[in-house]
Structure formats: structure tokens, C-alpha cells
């Protein structure tokens, strides 16, 4: 194909960039600061060095305009709360005493003060801190961070574009503050918030910003006429400011739909839209809206959420069509590159042929620059890149790893009966109670226990050959026995082996399944200083041999109490991986489910009576628009049932979910047909228990009473109080007592104290029930 040069030279840009550094320097500096080993000044300097390195890498790759303000010590939504002065009353004293410590107190809490609630950023595995607002909220501008980073970039000679969370999205992400009526709508504060944004924009303009990007991803979701009217009003008012930078309003993750004409007509200077497959409808919608005459269009044609190489010819075709719809078309990734690892070139353990198919942040910036050059100067200027890209795409399409006839034949043979347990829940529950003999309000944990430095060192020593398999397994066995002994002493009813052998709840399984690839350096931020290495799901999936049976049965042999078998469910195995994009997700989910079904069968055959299949990503992966919900939930719940339905009635199937808005999927939770579900509930004050009750959920549930994403130790009375709230919604015979999530990230002292308090809380409430 050939393309004419663009009338106005296309530029390359990105919306945001990974924050952690090549060796996770930011994580190490922040955690060192929390432990008192790194000074505040040293932390600030580390952050400054990382920003400079990021900008230089972008410029060296050919990016013309770099983002500023996207860098964060913890979370960019929390940064926005600071920018607009939305500090909760309980944290105000800490913030006034010291901005940095106050910031971390909002994120993590203290022993005396709870943190902000945390939940998923749209349909990603990134977590943001939920703003708490109410009728009495008073906003006040604090643009120091945004202006400071802009000034840094300008001083280095770059062309910067500050990036802010837009005012409409910020309010739509917010929740009523504690003590505020549940029906309070934060969007009613828009007129109070807009002058603060106007002040920040004025400060950025005065500091030298030509353009400012305002991110409005919430507008890709289904929005009411009132919400669309709020967006129209917000950008009418901000666009009417007399002394402001040029405004670029950005959306991503899906198509804008009914919000597109609202923004297209707004008095702003440009739009940034997602044109990848997930948002392909934006192209036709933009044409139907009359395009963007006289405005800038930033076209997100490189997928910012997955790691597969771009199809240059397809992207250039899209860009060529867009040239007639805007005054100027620039090239970008579909969203911030925060969601992908930094550099594929440093991976040494991936087959070089497969490595050709992968593009992490650095490779994506090169793709963006190549596309911008081809658009601006003609495709003849990138002829070599186009030829190499065609060869790489053909290599992937023809690879044996992507097609296993045996796996596909097994998946095609699945019937509806394979995804249903023969007996109804009531019969199963009776059989399980008789078999397990658990008390009222049984206590358990979610699965993982603290991953100590010694455990991580042991895994590293095994990989490096410093210890042999026998020495490593001895360390794992010792850890399992210690974890069991603590749980028995604390009085926990259903035990776990603590997962000391597991590096990550997805990666551990991916490394033992065909079709998956593991990276060594592919770190991606999940929340705060928590980074994960999502595996790459490149081909058809099967399970060559048992994955968890050995250590689960080892644990059960050392205790008379039931030990849960622990698996990660098929949807989460997809959601927390970089999934293949060459076949429907439903097909991939079925393959993974069948592999896990084999594991469930082997666990049961080995004597495991309680098996937990975690699906924390079920809500996360829900399509952003309601039109896609039914189809997604149909295959997602089928995959879970296919994993778990082959067991006997007396085998109790658990599942777990955390840090999401569960109200949208309560019916789907029911459709999973799990016997017991544990859910995050501590930060949201048992909201999910009320949602389950409202739905009439008939099975057993454990809404969490211990927030494990904070270092604070909740008292026994605090957890008992949450249990009593749970009992208001769920009968005692169906209520479990557990933390919100796994304990992998916690330290042993706080884990000991918190779980002892959890058991004490359960005993207190049991006694209250017995005496009532």
C-alpha cells in the first residue's frame, strides 16, 4: 500500500508511561522510605531521575510530545484528589503535618486511620484510590505537582503535554464519603470543581504549557443524559476560559458512543480517541459526527494494553481514513503505556522467534514513531519496517504454538452437562456440612501467607543453581508446616498451605501450562508499589501434569483440619495475562477451564475436600458497555462451572473476588454455582453483603473483615462490628469469616495479630448468637 504525506506533519505522542524504572527503582525507593531507610529527599530525587529517563527514552524513540503529570508515587487518581484539595477529614491532620506522609496515609492508612477505598481502573488490573466526596466537600487548587513536572520537562528542552484526570471522570469515579447518604451523587459537585480545574489550567499555561490533556475514560461507558449534559457543560466552561492552554480531551478502552458528538462540538482544541479493535466504532462515529474540522485528532492505533506487535498496514489504513476527518492527525497508543512492561529487548528466556511478536512500552513508542513518519512522509520512507512487520505477523500466524489440534478437539466436544453439578446447592450443602463438621461462622483465609525474603531468596537460589531441588523443597516444606501450626494455634477452621512455592497466582500456573510464556522483567503496576509480571498467553492451552496436588496433599498430611486446594480461575488466568488476540476470548477461556478441570479432579482424588478457584477478575473484565455484558458473562461463568463441576456433592467449591464493584455482577456470581464465595468488604463497609442479600443470594459467603492492603492491624472489636453488619444481610449459617484477600504482601507480625483478632471476633459473635 502507499499513503500520501499528511497535510500537517503527523506527530508521535503517548498518554503516559510506566513509572517503575528498569529495575523497579521507584518501588524500592518508596518501600525504603516507608521503612525509614530512604530519606524523603532521596525518594524525590529517584522519582525525578525516573521521569527524566522516561522522557529521554520517548524523545530518542521519535516521540515529539511527551506526557507530564502522569508519574505518580502511588496512584494518579489520588494525585488528582490532592490537586483539587479533596482530602478526607480523617487524613487532613496527616497531610497538614507532612504532604508526603499524608499522601501515603490516604493510600495505605495508618494504625488509627483507614485508607481510601481501592478498586479497579475500568476493566484493567490497575487499582485506583476512590475519591470520597460529600455535600460539604470544599475544593481548592494545588497545582504544585503538575507545574513542577511540566517545568522539569521544559528545562530539559522537551515539548511537554501535562495530563490530568478530567473533571467529569474524576467525579464519576468518586463515592459518597463515610457518613454521607448513599444516594449522594458526586457529579452534583461539578460546578464547584470546575473553577479549581480552571485555576490549575491557568497555572499550567503560565508555566509554559501549550497543550493540556484531560482524560475522560468514564465517557466510554453507558452514560445518562444528565451525565452527558455534565460533560457538555464542563467543556463548554473550560473551553470558554480566556487564558488557557489548548485542551486535548482523551478517551480510551472503548468507543465514546453518544459522548463523541458532545465532545466533538465542545469548544476544545482536540480529541484523543482509541481506534484499536476494542473501540473500532469510533471511526464510523467520528465520520457520522462530521469529523473534527479545525481541530487536532490524536489517533490511538497502537494497542496500549496488550503486548503484541502492531499491524502497520492496518494502522496506516485507519490513519489514512482519519486524515480527512480532522485538521491534524497525530499518532499514539490507545491509552497510557502504564499497562504494559517496559522493554521486551531485555527478555533472554523467550524464544527469539516469539520475541519478534512482542512489543512492550519501548517497542510501542518505536511503532508509534514509525507510523507517524509513514503518515507524514509517505510509506516509502518506512518500506523496510513494513516488510519486517509483515514477516513477523506471518511468523506468528503460522506458528505451531498457536494451534494444537488435540486441545481444540477437546474444547469442541464440551457439552452443557459438562458445566453443571448434578445435585442442587441445598443437597450439596447438607453433604458438605456433614463431611466437614465446621462450626457456625467458620474462619478461613484466602490462600497466600506472607512471602518472606527467605522464600524469595530460595526461589532465586534455585533458579541460579545455588541450591538443588531437594534443598529448595525442604525449605518449602518447613514453611508449610509453620503456616499450618500458626493457623491451628490461632484457631482457624479451614486451613491453607500458604502458597510458599508460588511466585504469583497467575504466573505459577502459567509456567506449568502449555501455550503460556513467562517473562523475567515484564513488570506492570497493579497498585502502589505492587508490581506483577503478567504471563503471555500465546497459544493453545493444556495441562501436561498436576500443578498443585503435591504441596496440597503434603499440607493435609500434617493436620486433621481441612486444607483448601487453591487454584486461579480461567477468567483471571486470562485477565491477568497478556492474552492472545487471534481468537475469541471465550475459546481461550474454555481451553484454560479444561486444563484446570483436570487439576480439580486430581485434587479431589488425592483427598482434598475444599477447593477454592479464585476469580477476582470476573468483574474487572466485564465490558464497559452494558450491550456486551450478557455475552461476556455467559462464557465467563460457563468457564468457571466447567472448571469446577466434575466433583462430588461433598466437595466444597469456593471462589474469591476482591476490589471491584460487585453490584453489577451479583446475578453472575449466583450463576457460578460455587458453594462459598469470599469477597472484599472491609473498606466498603460490608456493601457487598447487602448487595448479595438484595439479590437473594442463596449460598454461603465470606465478606472480608480484614483489609489486607493496609499495614494496620484491625482490632477484634472492629472486625466483630463488621461481622454484625454482615449478619444483618446474611444468615449466620451461611456466613464465613475471612480477610479481604490473600496475605502475600503483608509482614508476619501484622498477619499474626490480625488473624488472631479475626478468630477472636468470630468467637465473640458466635457467643452473642448462642446467647440471643
Image (cartoon, rainbow, N blue to C red):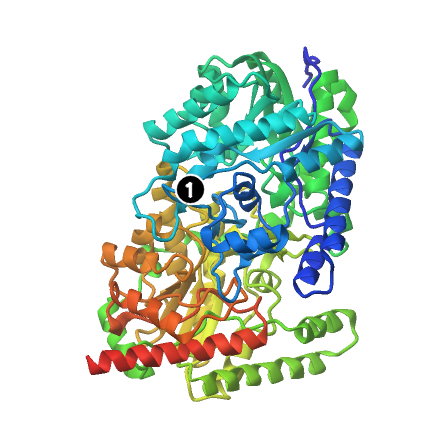
Is residue 327 visible to us here? Answer: yes
- Reply above or below: 87 against 199: below
Q: Which residue is mark 1?
A: 137
Q: Residues within 10 Å of mark 1 (few under 14, many from 20)?
A: some
- Reply above or below: 275 against 755: above
Position of the C terminus by quadrant = bottom left
x and y, in percent, of residue 524 in the image: 63, 51
x and y, in percent, of residue 320 in the image: 62, 17
x and y, in percent, of residue 723 in the image: 33, 69
Position of the N terminus by quadrant = top right
In the shown orientation, is residue 640 left or right of residue 365? left
Q: Residue at x 27, y 82 (%)?
A: 767
Q: Residue at x 24, y 54 (%)?
A: 695
Is residue 520 visible to us here? Answer: no
Q: Nearer the viewer, residue 680 or 586?
A: 680
Q: Nearer the viewer, residue 560 or 389?
A: 560
Q: Residue at x 57, y 24 (%)?
A: 248
Amino acid at each position: 500500500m502507499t499513503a500520501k504525506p499528511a497535510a500537517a506533519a503527523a506527530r508521535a505522542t503517548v498518554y503516559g508511561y510506566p513509572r517503575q524504572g528498569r529495575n523497579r527503582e521507584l518501588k524500592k525507593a518508596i518501600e525504603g522510605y516507608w521503612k525509614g531507610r530512604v530519606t524523603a529527599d532521596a525518594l524525590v530525587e529517584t522519582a525525578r531521575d525516573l521521569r527524566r529517563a522516561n522522557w529521554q527514552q520517548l524523545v530518542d524513540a521519535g516521540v515529539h510530545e511527551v506526557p507530564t503529570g502522569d508519574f505518580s508515587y502511588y496512584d494518579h487518581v489520588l494525585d488528582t484528589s490532592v490537586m483539587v484539595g479533596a482530602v478526607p477529614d480523617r487524613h487532613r491532620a496527616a497531610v497538614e503535618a507532612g504532604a508526603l506522609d499524608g499522601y501515603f496515609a490516604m493510600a495505605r492508612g495508618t494504625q488509627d486511620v483507614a485508607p481510601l477505598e481501592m478498586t479497579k481502573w475500568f476493566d484493567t488490573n490497575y487499582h485506583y484510590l476512590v475519591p470520597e466526596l460529600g455535600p460539604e466537600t470544599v475544593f481548592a487548587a494545588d497545582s504544585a505537582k503538575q507545574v513542577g513536572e511540566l517545568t522539569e520537562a521544559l528545562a530539559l528542552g522537551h515539548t511537554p503535554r501535562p495530563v490530568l484526570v478530567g473533571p467529569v471522570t474524576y467525579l464519576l469515579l468518586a463515592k459518597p464519603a463515610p457518613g454521607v447518604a448513599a444516594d449522594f451523587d458526586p457529579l452534583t459537585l461539578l460546578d464547584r470543581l470546575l473553577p479549581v480545574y480552571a485555576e490549575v489550567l491557568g497555572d499550567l499555561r503560565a508555566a509554559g504549557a501549550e497543550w493540556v490533556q484531560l482524560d475522560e475514560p468514564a465517557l466510554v461507558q453507558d452514560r445518562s443524559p444528565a451525565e452527558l449534559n455534565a460533560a457538555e457543560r464542563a467543556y463548554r466552561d473550560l473551553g470558554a476560559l480566556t487564558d488557557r492552554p489548548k485542551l486535548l480531551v482523551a478517551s480510551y478502552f472503548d468507543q465514546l458512543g453518544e459522548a463523541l458528538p458532545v465532545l466533538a462540538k465542545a469548544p476544545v482544541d482536540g480529541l484523543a480517541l482509541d481506534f484499536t479493535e476494542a473501540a473500532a466504532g469510533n471511526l464510523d462515529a467520528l465520520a457520522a459526527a462530521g469529523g473534527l474540522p479545525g481541530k487536532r485528532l490524536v489517533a490511538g492505533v497502537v494497542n496500549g494494553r496488550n503486548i503484541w506487535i502492531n499491524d502497520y498496514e492496518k494502522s496506516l489504513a485507519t490513519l489514512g481514513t482519519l486524515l480527512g476527518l480532522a485538521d491534524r492527525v497525530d499518532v499514539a497508543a490507545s491509552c497510557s503505556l502504564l499497562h504494559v512492561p517496559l522493554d521486551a529487548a531485555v527478555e533472554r528466556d523467550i524464544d527469539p522467534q516469539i520475541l519478534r511478536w512482542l512489543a512492550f512500552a519501548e517497542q510501542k513508542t518505536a511503532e508509534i514513531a514509525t507510523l507517524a513518519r509513514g503518515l507524514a512522509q509517505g510509506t516509502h520512507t518506512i518500506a523496510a519496517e513494513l516488510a519486517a512487520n509483515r514477516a513477523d505477523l506471518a511468523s506468528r500466524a503460522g506458528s505451531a504454538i498457536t494451534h494444537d489440534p488435540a486441545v481444540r478437539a477437546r474444547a469442541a466436544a464440551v457439552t452443557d452437562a459438562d458445566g453443571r453439578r448434578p445435585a442442587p446447592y441445598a443437597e450439596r450443602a447438607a453433604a458438605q456440612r456433614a463431611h466437614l463438621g465446621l462450626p457456625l461462622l467458620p474462619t478461613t483465609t484466602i490462600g497466600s501467607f506472607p512471602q518472606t525474603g527467605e522464600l524469595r531468596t530460595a526461589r532465586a537460589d534455585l533458579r541460579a543453581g545455588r541450591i538443588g531441588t531437594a534443598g529448595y523443597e525442604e525449605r518449602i516444606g518447613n514453611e508449610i508446616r509453620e503456616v499450618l501450626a500458626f493457623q491451628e494455634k490461632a484457631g482457624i477452621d479451614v486451613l491453607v498451605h500458604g502458597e510458599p512455592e508460588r511466585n504469583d497466582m497467575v504466573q505459577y500456573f502459567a509456567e506449568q501450562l502449555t501455550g503460556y510464556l513467562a517473562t523475567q522483567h515484564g513488570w506492570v503496576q497493579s497498585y502502589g508499589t505492587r508490581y506483577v509480571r503478567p504471563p503471555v498467553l500465546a497459544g493453545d492451552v493444556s495441562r501436561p501434569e498436576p500443578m498443585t496436588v503435591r504441596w496440597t496433599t503434603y499440607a493435609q498430611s500434617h493436620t486433621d483440619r481441612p486444607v483448601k486446594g487453591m487454584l486461579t480461575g480461567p477468567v483471571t488466568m486470562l485477565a491477568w495475562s497478556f492474552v492472545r488476540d487471534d481468537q475469541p476470548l471465550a475459546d481461550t477461556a474454555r481451553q484454560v477451564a479444561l486444563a484446570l478441570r483436570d487439576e480439580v479432579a486430581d485434587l479431589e482424588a488425592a483427598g482434598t475436600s475444599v477447593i477454592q478457584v479464585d476469580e477476582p477478575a470476573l468483574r474487572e473484565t466485564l465490558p464497559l458497555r452494558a450491550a456486551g455484558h450478557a455475552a461476556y458473562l455467559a462464557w465467563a461463568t460457563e468457564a468457571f462451572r466447567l472448571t469446577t463441576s466434575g466433583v462430588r456433592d461433598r466437595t466444597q467449591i469456593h471462589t474469591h473476588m476482591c476490589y471491584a464493584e460487585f453490584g453489577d455482577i451479583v446475578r453472575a456470581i449466583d450463576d457460578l454455582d460455587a458453594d462459598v464465595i469470599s469477597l472484599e468488604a472491609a473498606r466498603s463497609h460490608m456493601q457487598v453483603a447487602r448487595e448479595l442479600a438484595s439479590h437473594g443470594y442463596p449460598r454461603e459467603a465470606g465478606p472480608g473483615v480484614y483489609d489486607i492492603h493496609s499495614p494496620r492491624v484491625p482490632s477484634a472489636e472492629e472486625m466483630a462490628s463488621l461481622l454484625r453488619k454482615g449478619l444483618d444481610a446474611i444468615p449466620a449459617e451461611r456466613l464465613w469469616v475471612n480477610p479481604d484477600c490473600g496475605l502475600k504482601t503483608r509482614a508476619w507480625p501484622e498477619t499474626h495479630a490480625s488473624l488472631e483478632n479475626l478468630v477472636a471476633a468470630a468467637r465473640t459473635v458466635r457467643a452473642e448468637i448462642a446467647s440471643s
